[in-house]
Image: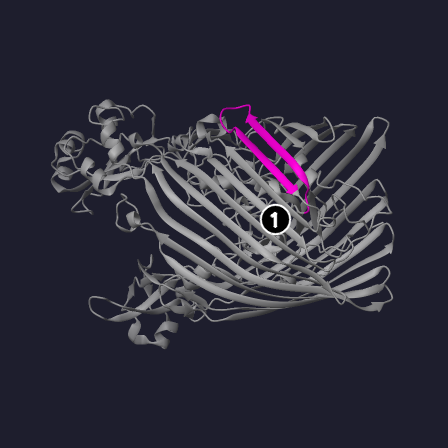
Amino acid sequence: MFQEKIGVRSVRLALGLLAGFVAGHALAQDAPMQRVEITGSSIKRIVKEGALPVQVVSKEVIARSGATTVADLLQKLPAMQGFTIEAIAAGTNSGGRTTASIHDLGGSYTLVLLNGRRMAPLEDNGSSVNLNSIPMSAVERVEVLTDGASALYGADAIAGVINFILKKNYQGQTVDAGISAPTHAGGKSANASITVGFGDLETNRFNVLMTYRHDEQKKVKATDREFSKTSYIPLGYDGQSYIYDRTSTSGTAANVNVAFKDAKANPQVGFNPYKKVNGKCAPGFFDYLSNTASTEYCAVDSASTVETVPESKRDTLFTAARFKFSDNVSAFADLALGRFDLTARIAANPVSVAVPVGSSVYNQYVAPYLSPAQLADAKTATATYRASEFGTRDSETITNVRHFVGGLDASFGGWDMNTGATFSKYKIDERYTGGYLLNKEFRSLIGGSSFNPFLPAGSATSPTAEQISSSIFHGSIREAYSDLRGIDVRASREVFTLPGGASSIGLGADYRQLHQVQTASDAAKAGEIYSFSAPAENDYKRTSSGAFAELSLPILKNLEMTTALRYDRYSGVEDKIAGRTKGESQSASTYKVSARYTPVTALLLRGSYGTGFRVANQSQIANNLVAAGFTSGSYACPAGLEAADATLCRPGRTQYNAYRGGNEKLSPEKSKQFTLGFRLEPSSSVTFGADLWDVRMTNQVSNVGEIQAFADPLKYRQLFTEFADPATGIKTWAFINAPINIGKSHNRGIDWDLTVGEKYSFGKMTMNVNGTHMLKSSYTVPGSDSEFTDSMDKYGINDQVTFRDIAKIVTTLETGAMTNALTLSYRNGYTDQAATLYSMATKANTTTQIRLQVPSYTTVDYQGKYAISKVWEVRGGVKNLLDKEPPLTLRTSSGHQVGYDARYADTMGRTIYVNTSYKF
């Protein structure tokens, strides 16, 4: 009952597929049985429920989900937590990167493959792949292994593997198109693709496939949605009224800070000159709710000017060629090209403007509001100006992806063999297209006698249109790329016979080179951009090699065991700019043992145990050590450092010099993990399964705070070095703020699913209920190896939430040419980040921070499919049918987006879409 023929559109899953992601049935029993390689094993075998939990998302299920991007598809799987979303491009240099993360372990521990081979990672990461690199129209199915797989795939597979299987041996022409439109303003999207294939690999001995797709996504402005329109948020808590104030004190009608020569006699003061003159803040400004006795600021609602969903365009092209030389030898070549163009817009540039003491502006707007003592002692006056009239800060990131694989498949002497060469490159070009200012021109403008930072936009002294256009920088600020090259070979065959059948062995080896480069533009390095520090430049290269062996042992007809062993070796990081190799070569051996047992035909029991590893990113090892000023606190020379070299100690209690950089002594992170699960199929219409999984990681890369380091310098000895004063040459101890191997984590949970299907006179109805229940998700406090914390159902110190329960229910009704599907998605509520609120009762900020209870979040989606003919089908649906808004959250890690968390809720709102597909 647990063995299915090849051609199954959707394998019945070990961990329970995402609701609705269990679709498809076995073909007729006389269909030819073929051996295929599945994710999680190097041995070709008949497709069946295995010892490892593999989720398979078929092409039909992808279409039924309504997803328009790979990220949208994957990040809605209940097993996915801790990923990166495209919306973080607002206020960061992410370029709209999206990543996958299995079981909240993180993108760095989740290996993403394309047709079973690695892609070039992000430009600043050794493993995470941008899901926007995947050509959506070429995807035939997705296989998700939710168990560690370092013993087969090497580093980075501690959480599991996501393998995108692309189309092959396709004949004909297919045109697809789709549009979607929210019922609120903004956010419209459209896509179109064409796929052409000719030649049959079996009859013509060749096949060529080409598919191209274009996507466009329109922006959603913060003011387009009620939940995101302001950073000045009234709310109720425990029967009281409060205001959450995330407004900014930088504005066009600027505040001013005045410093004095005698800081003890005259502490610094701040106020808003416009309010002093007019008795109230300028239009569009608020009274700042965090004012103190020495300040009287006005604040601007800067969050209202950002975007919730950035504007983007995507073009992808995938072409594949297969040629069969003989029945035993064939060649293949795959080429994937992609360009992703994203523009993110955030609030206008906040700028500090010096107001010379004694100038006309100072005498009119600052001096009248100082006491005689302050006026006589004034040292500097600084306006906290925001260049609103120069527009929002707009950054455009152009991502180009090139991925080529060529190789051979062969069968000789009982061996099934495959070898391939990979050339993969991920490149970004980050450009500023608006709102960022030219240094020379802007300094000239604000230094002019007519410039007045204390008046609202549109005043007589405001910059002219010509002055604005001539002061805005347009151009690139940096380029960066990851270049991955590799070659691999793998083979499998039957070796001997056991009571349960033929035993098979799989062998393989691979070699890779990763080259990562970042260069700052000439304009950035020349200081042409106002108040901008040029990105650090680097040029790193590292090689790795590995070999593995896997053995399947069918001990009995109903009992099979599999063992796997792998050895990997990584070189040190070659730093071209520094002219030397940093770090030492590293090696790791990992293993895995798994078993499946069917005591009766309706029940499958399975389990696995294994080890894993991950090497540190090249930047974590090789980033240059640069001076970073002094420690924040003052310290007496610790006894451990004094014992090491007392001549480097400073007298008394004082600050020490500080460095920032990588750590050449980092070693691989390690893991131990197991799974234990079952599949129960009491009838052909009912399937139930669950898998318990557990992952423990040690030696994780983490940063140690200076307080921890000075408290135990022997434990953190590698974080102290000597510093030579450039003026005197005197050497003293210095603290290095760099990563070390110290962190630990422990994650555990249960993936489960239930599928019930039944045929009725009016059609076939299928219901799937599945989800992930987290039991444990703890990790050490940064820099500690023993103090554990967690983010379970609460906003943690890692700026994330680990949800205990994420689940989906999908009900599908098939009635002839019409198919209807209803999807309910659920995640539980959580305790929000602690925040200081302004009390309307006391007219003051709360003395203790408040943590809201963010409610659970549920959405309902609908899709209907109608097959007009055998070659033409139309799908229409509504996402977020009930128009559920994101719940209020007071997190601060969102930067420019305030009041909601786009990672955990739908920011688009009710969205209507139509897709069509026509085959020629």
Total labels drawn: 1
Above or below, comparing residue 32 to residue 561 in the picture? above
Q: Nearer the viewer, residue 420 or 616?
A: 420
Residue positioned 30% across, 32% down in the render: 390
| Magenta residue span | 169-197
Amino acid on which the number 1 mark rests in the picture: Ala
Tell me which colouring the rendered structure shows: one colour
Residue at image position (21%, 39%) is: 441
* The C terminus, quarter of image: top right
Residue 660 image-quadrant placement: bottom left
Tell me residue 279's x, y (percent).
Answer: 25, 23
Q: Which residue is mark 1?
A: 320
> In the displayed structure, does residue 309 sit left or right of residue 368?
right
Q: Main secondary structure of the magenta part?
A: strand
Percent across and percent down for residue 884 are 58, 29
Residue pictured at 50% horizontal, 48% vertical = 401
- Residue 184 colored magenta? yes
